[in-house]
Image: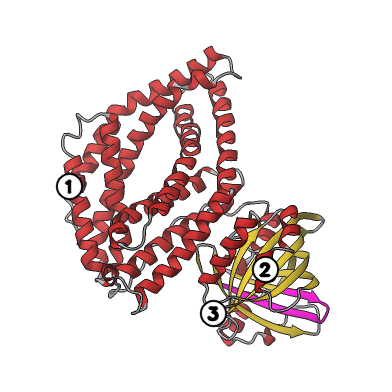
Amino acid sequence: MDANTSGQEIELKLLCTPAAYDGLRELPAIQRLATAAATTTHLRTCYFDTATHDLRQRGLSLRLRYDEDGIIQCVKSRKGRVGGLEFRGEYESRLTEPVPDLATIPDSKVRRRLRRLGKAGFAPLFETRFQRTSWPLLTSQGTRLRLDLDRGEICVGEQCEALCELELELVHGDPAELFELALEIHQQVPLQLSTLSKAERGYARLTGQPLDAVKGKPVQLPADANTGMALMQIMQNGLEHLVSNETGLLHGAENEAVHQARVALRRLRTFEGLFRKQFPNNNTQWLRTELRWLHHAFAPLRDWAVLKSELVEEVKCGLEQEPSLEPLVAHLEVLRRANAIAVANVFRSPRCTRFLLAFGLWLFRLGEQSTSPERQERALVKPARVFAQKVLARHFLRVTRRAKNFQSKTDEGRHRFRIELKKLRYAAQGFQSLYPAKRAKPFLAAAGRLQDALGHLNDVANARKLLSDLGDEASDSPEAELHFSAGVVLGWHMRKRTRLLRQAELALNKFGQCKPFW
């Protein structure tokens, strides 16, 4: 693959500390692959957009970069991402004046698009100022890369934040080697995978708002997909869902971002389990271990956040004469913040970066196994629809067995039923594009309503455990007030339990009336 002649940029971005930056400059791995001495330049880049940020909303960026040779205008368009590896359209042109000139954009479609979006004109919004040290690299497999070390700042007016990062860009060859080199460098100098471009960081500082939590996108499988291709696209979709919530996980761990990250991890764990036997020569134990680690690491924050922002808030809104719940609210916020810091530390840890890079590399190699005749495994070339029908039927049978005697089940029994239902629903969502939508949608809608009803019951059961354990956590609050507030909340939700059970049973009956779409 030649990134230059195809008019696109293929890039992997990793953040580093100032101390790591100094170590990277002399790293043996870089010196071994370098085909020329490093060059250092000082760059200033100004980003433009409309007053309503129309370019940002459509995944576009427009910038002018100033270097020793003059002014370069660059337009970038988001095309896709695999495990942190960004695919963007990139269109550059030389300018003589420091104002955008859309007429010089080499691609006519992009040129027309920016003209349409920029009828009211573009204005400068923020700048980046940094020193870039670059090396041209050549791997033993013949892949040509460029490694850039950037150190400087992103400035909105007088407010600036530090910039210290490493970029690996494909010039020509195998994109998977970007992951291999990043993993080698990461073994010697700890880095942090980042999916945020300089432009996205600038917009976040400009607006004062972090990026919103990101929901997973539907998987679109071609009708003739084989099993390997289906696995690659489904797992790629789940990984993209996870890393898209980077901002929320790193900065305050906003509740919805954590929820979306956990949904992504549950889906990935489901499909790792579904496809595990398809790899007789490809052990996925490492993947299973790391997915479980991350999922469990995010669980406490999600539990405390739901208790505070949903269950306690419902009581506050529902009681006409509210007893003071402030001791409980304040204590839960302390616990939420502590767990938010823990989640951020996990996500920026060397282990998490190593996992995300290894996962991205694994997906690329899986793609080779699915499309290259020389490397195909028999299990992977079978039609995806045949595989889907088999696994969906098996999991549907498990769900129907777990559904028996629903009313008499314990909280733990209903929780296990909910887990089986989730696995079925995630599997059905992954394969649904192989079937007519009018058959798949009613089944998925009924499964979703039942999962929500079971989720409410599980939240109440989980709240009972969390509130019962507060005595051990309450060293900074008057214990009597805290326990009184916890008792009010628990009593409120336990009174709802009968109604929630009835709603769940109705949802179960509706689900039972749906015909499987496979």
92 and 484: which is toward the camera: 92
Alpha-carbon neighbours of circle 3 within 10 Å: few (<14), some, or many (≥20)?
some
Q: Name the residue under label 3.
A: 173
Q: What residue type is labelled 2?
A: Ile
Q: Which mark is drawn over residue 512? A: 1
Q: What residue type is labelled 1?
A: Gly
Indicate the position of residue 90 as horizontal and vertical percent values. Answer: 61, 78
Of residues 246 and 50, which is closer to you in this image?
Answer: 246
Reading the image, the residue beneath label 2 is: 30
Q: Is residue 217 visible?
A: no
Corner quadrant of residue 277: bottom left
Q: Is residue 60 left or right of residue 264?
A: right
Q: Earlier in the sequence, mark 1 or mark 3?
A: 3
Task: Give the mark, 2 or 3, whose residue is nearer the N terminus.
Answer: 2
Foreground mark, 2 or 3? 2
Mark 1, Cα crowd under 10 Å, few <14 / some 14-19 / many 20+, is some
| Residue 428 visible in the displayed image | yes
Q: Which residue is drawn at 76% across and 68% down?
A: 132
Front disc: 1 or 3: 3
Magenta residues, as a range? 64-78
